[in-house]
Amino acid sequence: MTGWLILLVMAIGTGLLLWLTGFPRKLWTVAATALMLGAAGYAWQGSPALAGKPVIAKAQKGEIDPEVVAIRDAMFGRFNFTWGSFMRADAMTRAGAPDTAVRAMILTIRQAPGDAGAWAWLGIKLAENDGNQISPAAKFAFERAIQLAPQHPGPPFFYGLALIREGKFAEARPYWAKAVELAPAKASYRDQLLVRLFLLDRFLAAKAAEEKGR
């Protein structure tokens, strides 16, 4: 119960920080989404045995975050070969077939082995199929995406997202910071990356303060 009380305080504090630091109100919905992601992770942190549990059906409900999809499409483009593959894989995820979504992205990789976006989304689909755990195969996919496009913000952003979904917040931070660094100043998605990094930093600071107070 204490943990959830701390989380409530964090939520209120985050809203105050957003107001004090002048974040545009139009981006507050992004902040709320990112905070909910952090809330889920906070709950996971209270269950040390989570990593050793078998994957359960709840982890594979077939939900797709529309804001993540919007960032992906803005980063990698729409109405091209890769975008069509993204749509097919997303449809399979929504249908509750994450393993089929993985196979769809593997097929895309075979057809376009030099496409960094395809490798990054393969990493996401592999992690989702494993209950949001980053397997060696998913890690390889993310690292391959970064290798193919070292100056593109997409691969580090999605690697960081997968790490956050796994509950590895501190490990995700350098990847999200790199994504912000690489994002063009006028990119439509840059403000969302900034807000997500801002909230991740607030979460890490609150977590560190809690551990220090024990």
Image (spheres, rainbow, N blue to C red):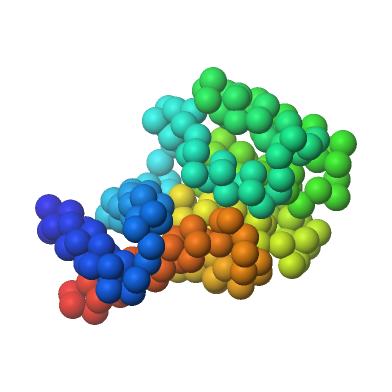
Write the residue at 71% across / 62% down: 152
Residue at left 25%, top 76%? 209
Residue 73 appears in the picture as rendered: yes
Q: Position of residue 143 (x, y in %)?
A: 71, 59
User: Residue at image x 56%, y 62%?
Assistant: 190
- Taking depth in this image into account, of 66 and 1 the one nearest to the observer is 66
Depth check: 211 or 174 in front?
Answer: 174
Q: Residue at x 55, y 71 (%)?
A: 177
Q: Quadrant of the C terminus?
A: bottom left
Query: 90 or 78, which lies in front?
Result: 78
Classify 109 as above or below 198. above
Q: Is residue 68 left or right of residue 121?
A: left
Q: Is residue 175 left or right of residue 118?
A: left
Q: Identify the image quadrant of residue 204.
A: bottom left
- Above-or-below relation of 163 to 77: below
Q: Position of residue 56 (x, y in %)?
A: 42, 31
Residue 30: give x, y in percent of width and height: 41, 52
Q: Compared with residue 92, is residue 197 higher up or lower down, i.e. above or below? A: below
Give the percent coordinates (x, y) of residue 64. 50, 35
In the rendered image, which quarter is residue 19 located in? bottom left
